[in-house]
Amino acid sequence: MGGGYFTNDTTRAERVRDLFDAIAPRYDLINDLQSLWLHRRWKKRLVALANPRSGQRALDLCCGTGDIAFALARNGADVTGLDFSKPMLDQANRRNCDLTVTFREGDALETGLPDDHFDCVTIAFGLRNLASFENGLREMHRLTKPGGKMLVLDFGKPTFAPWRWIYFCYLKWIVPWFGRLICRDAPAYAYIHESLENYPAQDGVEKVMHELGCKEITIHRILGSAMTINVGVK
Ligand SMILES: C[S@@+](CC[C@H](N)C(=O)[O-])C[C@H]1O[C@@H](n2cnc3c(N)ncnc32)[C@H](O)[C@@H]1O
């Protein structure tokens, strides 16, 4: 399946933003369909692991339409969601009826937010999209309070080769078909496979968390590592 949105050069961020600007109105629907509604469970698991206490500060980077940010807020946290796509944030703000979450437009690589400020910093299906996942983790680390948690949910790379093959075929051939059917944009969904091929996934994230000096580093594997959640404590 031909791509179109994935580039590995200086235009990458711009292409990624174009992609999410284009699919924003249908993003939630296609997420449900392509994951058979399972993404909701994976996100619940991320929030359970983050487990912010009432009144603690939580930041959700690449917040998109706000699923994680709202779930953190339901836990009682004081939540900021940040994303660089205005149409995605418009969808989030539409859902923000009681205005419990502060949504900000900004770049996850350069948030401009203060050092050591948040009790937890989460990113779901976002780190893989950044021009540099290492710099994304550095920024998360900078923003997290000492003792606070960094959590990354994203597509993983299964280690069991036959399962990895089936899973990658699903991402490469079936997911773009959903994209064509629902958004009339197959390349936007071919992007998931292309970006995952160019991303070191759970092991790469774990390595950088070690380099940053995180403690209590764990990888939570879902569906044989098709999805993974990396957790580290600053
Ligand atoms: C796949 S969506 C994930 C949205 C949400 N976290 C979720 O799990 O449903 C990726 C989001 O990352 C955002 N994004 C990608 N690169 C970004 C960057 N450099 N800075 C801020 N947001 C970015 C996109 O605009 C998009 O909303």
Image (cartoon, rainbow, N blue to C red):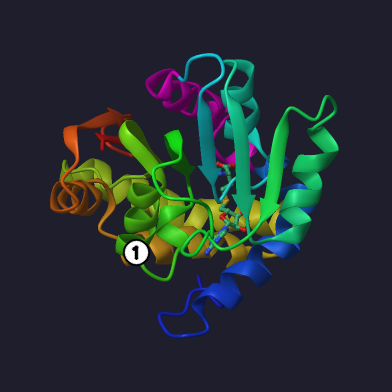
Q: In the displayed structure, would residue 10 be above or below residue 36?
A: below
Q: In which quarter of the image is ligand 1?
A: bottom right
Q: Would you say 98 lies left or right of 181 here?
A: right
Which residue occupies the foreground of this view, 29 or 123?
A: 123
Q: In the displayed structure, would residue 149 be above or below residue 113?
A: above
Q: Is 43 colored magenta in this rendering?
A: yes
Q: Name the residue under label 1.
A: 135
Q: In which quarter of the image is residue 84?
A: bottom right
> Which quadrant of the rendered structure holds the C terminus?
top left
- In this rendering, the count of numbered labels is 1
User: Is residue 108 in view from this perspective?
Assistant: yes
Q: Residue at x 21, y 47 (%)?
A: 209
Which residue occupies the foreground of this view, 81 or 146?
A: 146
Secondary element under disc 1, as helix, strand or loop, is: helix
**What range of the chain is rendered magenta?**
31-51
Query: In the rendering, at what x and y percent does residue 125 appear?
Result: 48, 47
Which residue occupies the foreground of this view, 176 or 72?
A: 72
Q: Residue at x 33, y 29 (%)?
A: 222
Q: In which quarter of the image is residue 176?
A: bottom right
Q: Would you say 144 lies left or right of 15 here?
A: left
Q: Decide whether the magenta segment is chiefly helix, strand or loop.
A: helix
Q: Residue at x 35, y 61 (%)?
A: 133
